[in-house]
Amino acid sequence: MKHFFITILAVMALSSCSEYQKALKSEDTGEKFKLATELYDQGKYSKANRLFAQIEPKYKGKPQAEKLMFLYAKTYYMMEDFYLSGYRFDRFVSSYPKSEKLEEAAFLGAKSFYELSPIYSKEQKETVEAIQKLQIFVNRFPDSQYLIEANALVKELDYKLEKKAFSIAKQYNTINDYQASVSAFDNFILEYPGTSFREEAMFIRFDSAYKLAINSVQRKKEERIENAFGYYNAFTRSYSASQFIEQANEMKADLENQQEQFRTKS
């Protein structure tokens, strides 16, 4: 009995494969569309995609084109080819602004761009584009069933940009480019006022200003020491109980000594 069922399954698989191969070679677009839809419903997205690709040009302007274009885009999404799913869903949204699938297509198109966003340490062009796409979706469909997920994706992408900006500013401090570090942290704190990195950012900014001051040539030292005091005060006003406070106070004491020595020499 077991061998009987295995044989039946094998025959069915061969029959299905034969039907698919026959459809690929057929000139009957209706047959291709019907089988592609069946394959899509069965989760066989790669095979469905291949058939949709063959018949898409022949359905332009026809009533069935709307369904075809949506399913065609969805096959790319399900195959995790997010470059093409994003492109295809964008085309669908612009081509069928009154479609009942418009909201889903707009969301999946935006989410395709989200899926293309790289890790924070890499160039973030795709991340910025994904945020823009998701924000357009949120603005267009403020009552969408996908709204909570869309906002969560935007928040995740925003955090990625935030972490990228923080890591760049911190890297300047690491490679001893203290002036660039101070400037980068100034911009970071201004751009991300509610960042979870704010305490560490304000401390490293002070650390950079401190190191810039004590390593300066004599003619620039006094001004840079005063600037460093300003960053110290900004840090301690916000984080008087910080884990970095002891280190910050030691650096402040060193700055005071440096300042006293500078004035004595003057």
Image: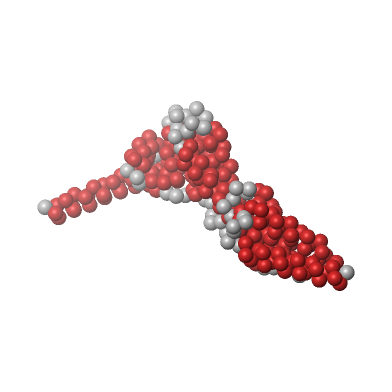
Q: Is residue 193 above or below residue 64?
A: below
Q: Residue furthest left?
A: 1
Give the total number of marks visible in the rendering: 0
Q: Is residue 53 above or below residue 59?
A: below
Q: Residue at x 51, y 41 (%)?
A: 151
Q: Is residue 11 above or below residue 56?
A: below
Q: Nearer the viewer, residue 37 or 97?
A: 97
The percent coordinates of residue 155 (x first, y second) are: 53, 46
The percent coordinates of residue 175 (x first, y second) are: 67, 68
Q: Residue at x 43, y 33 (%)?
A: 67
The percent coordinates of residue 146 (x first, y second) are: 46, 37
Q: Nearer the viewer, residue 81 or 164?
A: 164
Q: Residue at x 81, y 71 (%)?
A: 261
Q: Nearer the viewer, residue 180 or 39?
A: 180
The percent coordinates of residue 62 (x first, y second) are: 46, 29
Q: Is residue 212 left or right of residue 153?
A: right
Q: Residue at x 82, y 64 (%)?
A: 222
Report whether residue 99 is seen.
yes
Q: Is residue 90 above or below residue 211?
A: above
Q: Nearer the viewer, residue 229 or 152?
A: 229
The C terminus - image quarter = bottom right
